[in-house]
Image: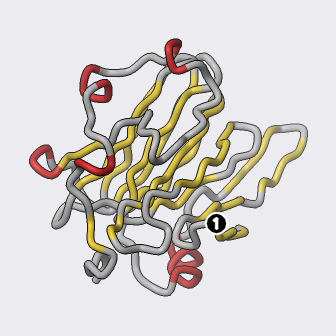
Amino acid sequence: MRFIRTEIEDVIIIEPVVHGDERGYFVETDRQDKLEAFLGFKVHFCQDNESKSSKGVLRGLHYQLSPAAQTKLVRVIKGRVLDVAVDIRKGSPTFGKHVAVELSEENKRQLFVPRGFAHGFVVLEDETVFAYKVDNYYSPENDRGIAFDDPSIGIDWQMKLSSLKLSEKDRHQPHLSDADLFAYDEKLYV
């Protein structure tokens, strides 16, 4: 596995080694020991999630507040997405900045999205299956979101905004300036 720091150093691209031949391929999608050695702290994933979506579906930007904050390790099993992580740690030198990475069944890349970040993705191909691990259980009372089209963040979703398919929840999220956020000095990991 290769770990690549992005422009926001806490957000990490993971490129697994793919072993393939005429029979197909084999890939390790998660190596806790290698990930923790790279990060320098422990991450205990406790829940796996999967969604299937069609082209143009946008899910996000979502996060959970402490004490239910979540780290996510995301990947695409089938299809292709543009995956986005936004720094929502007030006081951070990269506050309000984002990283956008294409994840696909071909490139097998994964994105490590730490606590203190909002996460979302837009589906770029029909019949896309998206999977992710989280290190804290879903908590409805701590569930929050930010407007996907907040101009202060300026995400290029690579599609016309009018063609996006959104849930009612995601149509009515607050802008970053009005959202519940994390503090940069908030202790997010034990």
The residue nearer to you, when weighing 15 against 91, is 91
User: Tag count in the figure?
Assistant: 1
Residue 186 drawn at (x, y percent): 26, 78
The residue nearer to you, when weighing 91 against 69, is 91
Q: Is residue 156 left or right of residue 22?
A: left
**Residue at horizontal 44 percent and vertical 57 percent from the top:** 96
**Residue at horizontal 83 percent and vertical 38 percent from the top:** 23
Residue 183 drawn at (x, y percent): 27, 72
The residue nearer to you, when weighing 46 against 121, is 121
Which residue in the structure is indicated by mark 1? 7
Q: Is residue 13 above or below residue 22?
A: below
Q: Is residue 117 left or right of residue 154?
A: left
Q: Residue furthest right?
A: 22
Q: Is residue 172 above or below residue 73?
A: above
Q: Is residue 51 above or below residue 61?
A: above
Quadrant assignment, res 81: top right
**Residue at horizontal 70 percent and vertical 68 percent from the top:** 1
The amino acid marked with disc number 1 is Glu
